[in-house]
Amino acid sequence: MLRVADFAAGSDVGRVRRANEDAYYLKSPLFVVADGMGGAQAGEVASELAVESFRRPLDESAAPEPRLAAAVQNANRAIHEQSRSNEQLQGMGTTVTALLLDDDSLTVAHVGDSRAYRMRGGELTRLTDDHSLVGEMVRRGAITEAEAEVHPQRSILTRALGPEAEVEIDTLTHGVRPGDVYLICSDGLTGMVADQVIAEQLGSGAKMQTVVDELIRLANEAGGMDNITALAFTVEDGAGAGTSAPQADEVAADSTGVGPAVETEAHSATLATPAAVPQTAAANGALDAAERDSRSTAAYERRRASTGRSRRRVGTVIACGVVVIALAGAVVASLNVFFIGGNDQGLVTVYRGLPYDLPGVSLYTRDYVTGTPVSDLPPALSARILDHRLRSRADALDLAQQIDAGRIDLQGTGGEPTGSTGGN
Ligand code: CA
């Protein structure tokens, strides 16, 4: 029988944002982090709705995975319905990552790009997949982790709570060992602090409050570009652990200085009075400028145009289904991202859109076909050029025309104008 030995959480607005749209909830052995997105304060409403779903009694008769999944699905429904019925909340969404320790296993329910990590025996393991465009590109081998971290589209989510009536949820159960340290965090931490540094902190042996505070400090020191939330806990053998194990409820969490009460209240106020949310164009503009370069998906732009409001963060779900098929043509036509691949004839081709096929529909159209067969490119060069990396049209066309003109280095040692792929 294992139990939580020490836990702590912290959330910080960071150094750029004006508001904190992250939320967390802990009622050991249940731990939840949500990272909201949306215009004005809609992101705060979304993340608060996500954690509120876990504040309600969960179905104890269900196994841990369906129990957590039901809470996530309920949260999704609540967010989706509110965003449809309240113009000010239109398009809001949130990530959610929930961990539940149950005897000697840990169940994870997860949607979005907040992450769960486990530190065991000096080794850091990521327990969640990022449901983001770059996360999927990494899993397909199109780009490296290092490239993903600086990718201009790194904030685009492929799954979130809110955009659709139903959401696909990742649920997993892991074996737990005494001494394990777990972390849940928003991308305001992982976008700023390398995994290696996170591993050092989790493995430091310090109290969880110290670890959490230090992680948040490090994210701010690195720029604090986004809201930062970290929630960490350690697991020990229940036998002989005495009274040190906090079988905590929210009150106990407060008494350890960890409680989510302040944040919860702030979010509740937003929930109760969404009509009172100030719509300050200047404030929206400032937020907009801070993240403009990460907001270039057509799907996102489509939603933005439909509400006439700025969005704090790109958050869109590219989902399978009739709606997507109907919209795909318009989406692709308005996309301003390009990638290079081979066409049916094997010629190097510039495509507009995203390098994905959904059932019955492609998310790209042909933009420019070179006269150069892919097979003419040396493997090292084709691996770099045909990597499906998203490029500007100027970059993609420049590259294609250099290939056609024979000006590109066919030994694969140069000729990549942007210089940001391959060897780094
Ligand atoms: Ca975030």
Image (cartoon, rainbow, N blue to C red):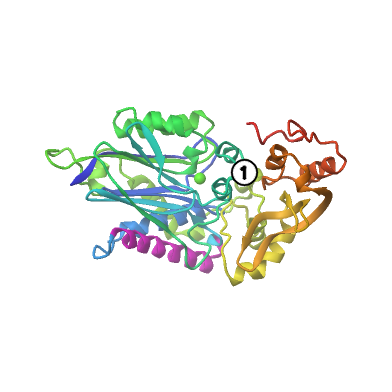
The reply to whether the magenta stretch includes residue 385 is: no
Residue 406 vs residue 304: left or right?
Answer: right
Quadrant showing the C terminus? top right
Above or below: residue 415 compared with residue 357: above
Above or below: residue 164 compared with residue 248: below
Q: Image quarter for residue 239?
A: top left
Instruction: Tell which of 52 and 97 is nearer to you.
Output: 97
Residue most extreme to the right: 405
Above or below: residue 308 compared with residue 122: below
Q: Few, some or many C-alpha atoms within 10 Å of disc 1 (few <14, some 14-19, many ≥20)?
A: some
Residue, disc 1: 291
Residue occupying the point 54% across, 41% down: 17
Tell me the element at label 1. helix
Q: Position of residue 285 (x, y in %)?
A: 64, 46
Residue occupying the point 44% across, 63% down: 76
**Taking the image as drawn, is residue 217 in sight?**
no
Instruction: Tell which of 10 and 380 is nearer to you.
Output: 380
Residue occupying the point 76% across, 47% down: 374
Q: Position of residue 212 (x, y in %)?
A: 37, 34
Q: Where is residue 35 in the image (x, y as percent from the top left)?
A: 46, 49
Residue 57 vs residue 134: left or right?
Answer: left
Is the residue marked 1 within 8 Å of ligand 1, measured from its CB? no
- State the extent of the magenta-drawn residues as a range: 64-88
Q: Image quarter for residue 75?
A: bottom left
Residue occupying the point 44% across, 29% down: 197
Going by the numbered disc 1, the residue's amino acid type is Glu
The reply to whether the magenta stretch includes residue 76 is: yes
Q: Position of residue 40 (x, y in %)?
A: 55, 53
